Image: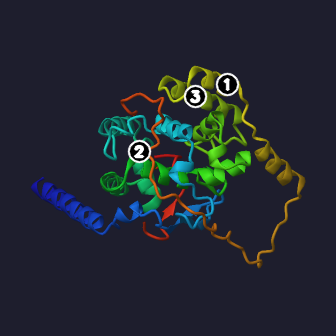
Amino acid sequence: MKKILLYMSLAVSAYLVYVAISLSMMPPVSNLADRKFNTTIQVKDWQGEYHPFVVGPKNRYWTPSARIPVEMKWAVILAEDANFYKHEGFDVKAIKNAIKYDLEKRSLKRGASTITQQTAKNLFLSREKTITRKLKEIYLAYRMEQELTKGRIVEFYLNVVELGPMVYGIGHGSRYYFGKSPSELTPRECAFLAAMLPGPRVAYNPYKNLGKVLKRSDMILRLLRKRGVLSEGEYQAALAQSPNVGHMQQKVDAIISVPPVFSSPSSARQEPADKPPESVLEKDETAVPEAAPATQPAVETVPNNSTESQTEKK
């Protein structure tokens, strides 16, 4: 028994040393504060293939914080991380609840990731569900909260979030679904995009479950009204609006109307090109709406690190 305990102690000690060394080798997050910062990460398409994705103003869809509607920012905060303005990168209570749930279910399905953790994972880490990756994620999230403003974190989050098949970021998502820039999005359209975040590939895929996405967007609109982001008139107008997803339907119709073309086994497979650049504003915005309450409620940079959908989840 003593030998077993000794071996267990040695194993735990070795693991802790490994984790400590891994954390010490993590890249600095201070570079993320630079508005001209660019990096390339790897994202996975819906066929499981990896592609390079530019994070920063060299991506033509990159949308600076000031050009993202207040309703879009609050929609993701209230739906994904209600304590965003209260925690320092990780939510201890949520982590405890997740551990309890996972022990009961004997799984690692619930991760309790904050917006900051999701951003850290997408910029620096892989999607593997391990304790080591979770510890790295928490450490990076804490460092990001020390180095960046909340507004900058949300800006990164919304510019790398997955919203469709090789559709990453609010700049691409708003054009893909609605044919407009993010600054032109209505509150209903903001809620629609935020509603997709828990699972744009399956559960909240508007191609397959449009009704489910709309129902969740109604819930998000209620949260926006409750927190004072929307006035009663704006809320009622948003509820009455049906998101114009005609741009999306045109894509579906085009795909259906064109017969599939199968390449020969010897055909070379072409990867999609990186997205070209757009300018970025100088000033960071925390994006707290004037109508919001005084107490604010409760977004991976090593090139070629991989990330899948950051919200199918955590």
Q: Residue at x 70, y 51 (%)?
A: 175
Q: Which residue is mark 1?
A: 237
The answer to which of marks 2 and 3 sits earlier in the sequence is 2
Give the CA distance from mark 3 to mark 1.
Answer: 11 Å
- Crowd class of label 1 (few under 14; some 14 to 19; many from 20; radius 10 Å): few
Vertical placement of residue 117 versus 298, above or below: below
Vertical comparison of 93 with 310: above or below: above
In this picture the colour scheme is rainbow
Q: Nearer the viewer, residue 64 or 204?
A: 64
Residue depth check, mark 2 versus mark 3: number of the one nearer the observer: 3
Residue 160 image-quadrant placement:
bottom right
Q: Is residue 126 visible in this depiction of the protein?
A: no
Q: Residues within 10 Å of mark 2 (few under 14, many from 20)?
A: many
Q: Is residue 239 above or below residue 141?
A: above
Q: Earlier in the sequence, mark 3 or mark 1?
A: 3
Badge 3: how crowded within 10 Å, few (<14), some, or many (20+)? many
- Labelled pair 2, 3 in contact (Cβ < 8 Å): no
Residue at the (71%, 46%) spot, across then down:
177
Which label lies toward us, 3 or 1? 1
Query: What residue did someone put label 3 on?
Result: 221
Number of callouts in the render? 3
Given residues 127 and 217, the one toward you in this image is: 217
Classify residue 18 as left or right of residue 5.
Answer: right
Residue 79 visible from this viewpoint:
yes
